[in-house]
Image: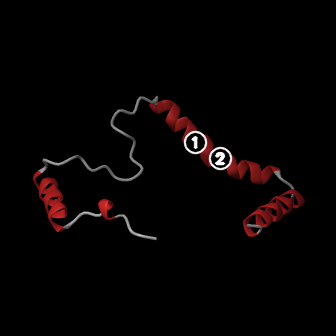
């Protein structure tokens, strides 16, 4: 498959971006996973969601029997290898 040359930057574009970043004139670079600047979500709701998400899988695993977990694993393996 041909590469997309338009997506690659040449040496001068990279040098220009580095110079802008060094002088603080370029766009702000946020770390991956950081929320956007215009985040309108309620911080309390976000924290509550993260708390529930961290419990979800563990609570479900604790409530399943060994036979149910085995059936779920077999079904997942069949889907994964059945492609």
| Residue under numbered circle 1 | 51
| Residue under numbered circle 2 | 55
Where does residue 26 sit, x and y in percent of width and height?
A: 17, 48
Total marks placed: 2
Task: From the viewer's side, name the closer residue of 72 and 65.
Answer: 72
* Mark-to-mark CA distance, 1 and 2: 7 Å
Whether residue 18 sits left or right of residue 32 in the image: it is: left
Residue at image point 86% right, 60% down: 71
Residue at image point 76% right, 54% down: 61
Q: Among all residues in the image, which is located at the extreme right?
A: 67
Where does residue 50 sit, x and y in percent of width and height?
A: 55, 42
Residue at image point 46% right, 28% down: 42
Residue at image point 21% right, 46% down: 27
Confirm or deny contact between disc 1 and disc 2 (CB under 8 A): yes
Where does residue 66 sit, x and y in percent of width and height?
A: 86, 61
Q: Secondary structure at mark 1?
A: helix
Quadrant of res 81: bottom right
């Amino acid at each position: 498959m041909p590469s997309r040359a338009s997506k690659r930057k040449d040496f001068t574009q990279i040098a220009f971006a580095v110079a802008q970043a060094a002088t603080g004139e370029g766009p702000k670079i946020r770390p991956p996973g950081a929320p956007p600047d215009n985040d309108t979500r309620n911080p309390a709701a976000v924290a509550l969601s993260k708390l529930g998400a961290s419990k979800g899988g563990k609570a479900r695993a604790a409530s399943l029997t060994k036979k149910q977990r085995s059936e779920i694993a077999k079904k997942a393996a069949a889907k994964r290898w059945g492609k």
